[in-house]
Amino acid sequence: MKSQANSTAVGKIFLRNVGILVFLGALFSLFAPPDALAVQVKRVQTGEVYFDSDDISQNVKVSAVDQTKTFILLYPYMDVSTTNNSQNTLYTADFESNSSIVVSRDGGTVACTVRYYVVEFVDGVNVQRGISSFAAGSYTNPDYTTKDITLTNSLTNYQNAFVIVQGRSNLTNYYSDQQTTVSGNLTDNNTLHLQRNASNETLRATNVVWQVVEFLHNNSTYPDFKTWSGATTIDIAETNHTAPLSPAITNLNQSLLFFTSRAGRGIVGNNTTMYGYENRYRTRGELTNTSTATFYRAYQNNVANTQVDIQWFVIEFYDQSSRVQKNTQAIASGTETITGSLAPAVDDTRSFPIISVSGPNQ
C-alpha cells in the first residue's frame, strides 16, 4: 500500500499542483465545543496515496467511520511529465468498508499523488453515495448526457443538500477531458440529476462516483443554518459570472460554497472549441460578498459551446463553533508548492479545505 496519513499543519495549509494554476481555498473548521443541535464535525482524516505510473487503484486504511455521516474529498497532483493523457489525473473515491476507501483512476501512464479528506460528522448530516456511468455517444441523445438517479432514502429537504461528483475515464489523449465534467443537483427529495454537455469527443465511458450530503436539524424557531442554491452559466464570451444570493448572507466567516460544473463541447481537430483546454473550463468559485457568489475561468474566445454550466450550493452556519476562512492565491509557472496562512489557527483534526482552480490565462 502506498499511502501515508498526515495532517495539515495548524495555522497553515499547503497547496500543491502543477504550476500556472490559480487556487481559491475555503477552510471549514470547528474551533470550540459544538452546540447540542448544530452540525458537528467529529473528525477529519487526511493523508496522501501515491500511484505509480501504471497503478489504477489504491486501498487506504482509515479509522472506522459511519458512512452515512461521512463524505470524501480528493485533490490529485501529477508528477512532472510531458505526457498529457487526461486519465492520469481523473480520480474517484468510495468506501470499501467502514475502515477503508478505494481511490481509483481508469488508466495510468504517469505517477500521481492524491490527497484525500475523509470528513465525518457526529450529527446533523446524512450522506448517501453511489456509482454511475455515461457511455460515449451523440450529445443530441440524452441517454449519453443526462441521468436521473432515484435515491435509496428520501431526503428530508433537498434544498438543504449538496452534491459531490467525481469522474474518471480511460482517456489516452489531451483533448477529451471535458466529457468527464459532470454537474449534479437535486430536483426533489428523491432524485439526483447528473448532466454533462460533451459526450463523444472520444469513445470512452465516463465513470462517476457521487455523494449527496444533506444537512439536518434545521427548525424554524432556532435554525442551525440557512441554504441557497441555484444554476448559473459562464457564457461563451465571459471569464466570470455572478450569481445573486437573496436574502443576503449574514456572516461570510461562517458560510461555505460548494459547486459542480460541466464544460461545453469540443470538436476533435478544432482547437477553438473546448478541446481539453483547462483554462476554458476549470472553474473557481468564491463568495465575493454577502449577496453574490462569483465563478471564474481564465480564458474565453467567444466560440459556440464553450460555456461552463454550474450548479452551486451555499450554506451559512448559525452556531458559534463553525468558522470559514478563504483566500485566493496564484501558483507561478514552475512552482509546485505554496503555503497559505490561517488566522486564527485551526484544529486540523476537525477542519477540511474546499479548493477550486482556474488558469492559466493563455
Image (cartoon, grey):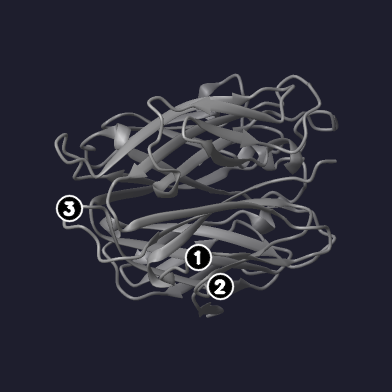
User: Between tags 2 and 3, which lies in front?
Assistant: 3
Mark pair 1, 3: CA separation: 28 Å
User: What quarter of the picture does the C terminus occupy?
Assistant: top right
Rate crowding at label 1 as few (under 14), some (14 to 19) or many (20 or more) other CA atoms within 10 Å: many
Relative to 111, say whether 309 is above or below: above
Quadrant position of residue 150: top left
Q: Position of residue 292 (x, y in %)?
A: 51, 30
Residue under the point 74% across and 45% down: 359
Viewer-proximal residue, 56 or 161?
161
What's the amino acid at mark 3?
Leu
Q: Is residue 197 visible?
A: no
Give the mark nearest the N terminus, 1 or 3: 3
Secondary structure under tag 1 reads strand
Secondary structure under tag 3 reads loop
Q: Are marks 1 and 3 in contact (CB under 8 Å)?
A: no
Viewer-proximal residue, 90 or 216?
216
Label disc, if present, on residue 37 of the rendered structure: 3
Relative to 97, say whether 72 is above or below: above
**Label 1 belongs to which residue?**
116
Relative to 315, say whether 3 is above or below: below
What's the amino acid at mark 1?
Tyr
**Label 2 belongs to which residue?**
49
User: Between tags 2 and 1, which lies in front?
Assistant: 1
Q: Are marks 2 and 1 in contact (CB under 8 Å)?
A: yes
